[in-house]
Image (cartoon, rainbow, N blue to C red):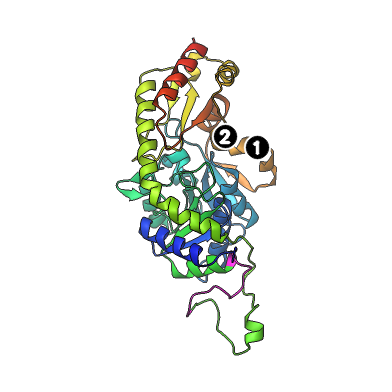
Amino acid sequence: MFTMGENVRRFEQAFAAKFGKKHAVMVNSGSSANLVATGALAYRRHRPLQRGDEIIVPAISWSTTFYPFQQYGLKLRFVDVELETLNMDVSQLEAALTPKTRAVAVVSILGNPAALDVVRAFCDKHDLIMFEDNCESMGATLHGKPAGTFGDVGTFSFFFSHHISTMEGGMVLTDDDELFELCRAMRNHGWTRDQPAGSSLFEPRDDDFFEAYRFILPGYNVRPLELSGAVGLEQLQKLDGFTAVRRANGKHFSERFANDKRFIIQRENGESSWFSFTVILNPEHGADRKRVMQALKAADIGYRIITGGNFLRHDVIKHFDYDCVGEIVNANIAHDRGFFVGNHPFDLRDRIDTLYSVLDAATR
């Protein structure tokens, strides 16, 4: 048995218990978690998402935060991010609201919790769905509550560079029984097999021959492997230790770069799980990012764009129904003048010192 089975089931149970949620559904990636969660919201009985509905989204996130919303016919309303946290500027939420708004997709960028409590209160006030993409921020907390548990659905990724890894893998968390059943069906061909006893999605029939392959939803095949479930069980036990080391590295990074106005670094909201170390070259100081990139490359320091940068700047946006709420300023600054360097669950203090020295020399 290489496809999902007992190890996946045990990992789902352990993951739900770890984060204090009722249900967890494992899939083959965080991207697939976003896909089946969106699909589940589109097929629920009461007020499902429908084509033409609007969803408020941040200008910075990974591409597969946005793709499922486009694929299910939603209109995206982009709001800018805060320059220092890199998360959605929640002061724009009221301006983004229209009679067609049905949901807010909130993303905690690179380990740093977004204003999840503010978004939760806004969604409750206006009867909106809170879709929480936590694929980059496992282990982060806000007011002691884990990121990924504020939304009606929360998604996680276990990609090889993330906080824990099953090589490829993802998870959907929810307390909603119907969404749980819908996600289980949608990850697995949209059929009735793998549904919990007493599922509300269908009425069982007596014909075993037909029931074995009975399709009830337009689903996918995004099942995880047993090996991924087994690895996940072991990795989950190490999450707290991994996160503690990442936070120690983050503390050293923050102290090393503190009060240096040439660099804008990510300001923690709550307790970050420090996916990486973000640096934005302060526009007021005029440093040349190309020169900085050359210096990093010469020093053999890896770097990359901040979570894909401003999504509105990518060619694929021509395929979306979207608009922007106000001017998008900070996401463009992060796109044009920012980058990140990876964090890892081992002591990086000496390498962080080297990073500072290289950036110091390259921006003089």
The verdict on residue 212 being magenta is no
At a point 56% along the width and 22% down the height, the residue shown is: 300
Along the line of sight, the residue nearer the viewer: 142 or 194:
194
Check disc 2 and give the amino acid type.
Answer: Gly
Residue 130, horizontal then vertical, whole percent: 45, 55
Q: Would you say residue 331 is visible in this rendering? A: yes
Q: What number is the disc on residue 314?
A: 1
Q: Residue furthest front?
A: 1
Query: Which of the 4 image quarters holds residue 308?
Result: top right
The spot of residue 177 in percent (x, y) is: 44, 70
Viewer-nearest residue: 13 or 35: 13
Q: Earlier in the sequence, mark 2 or mark 1?
A: 2
Q: Are there few (<14), some (14-19), or many (20+) residues within 10 Å of tag 1? A: few
Mark count: 2
Q: Judging from the image, what secondary structure is the residue with disc 2 in? A: loop
Residues rendered magenta in the picture: 186-198
Q: Nearer the viewer, residue 132 or 157?
A: 157
How far apart in space, not on screen, are marks 2 and 1 (Cα)? 9 Å
Q: Are marks 2 and 1 in contact (CB under 8 Å)?
A: yes
Report the residue that reaches farthest toward the top: 364
Please tell me the numbered disc located at residue 208: none
Residue receiving disc 2:
309
Q: Nearer the viewer, residue 165 or 304?
A: 165
Up-down: is 202 above or below 306? below
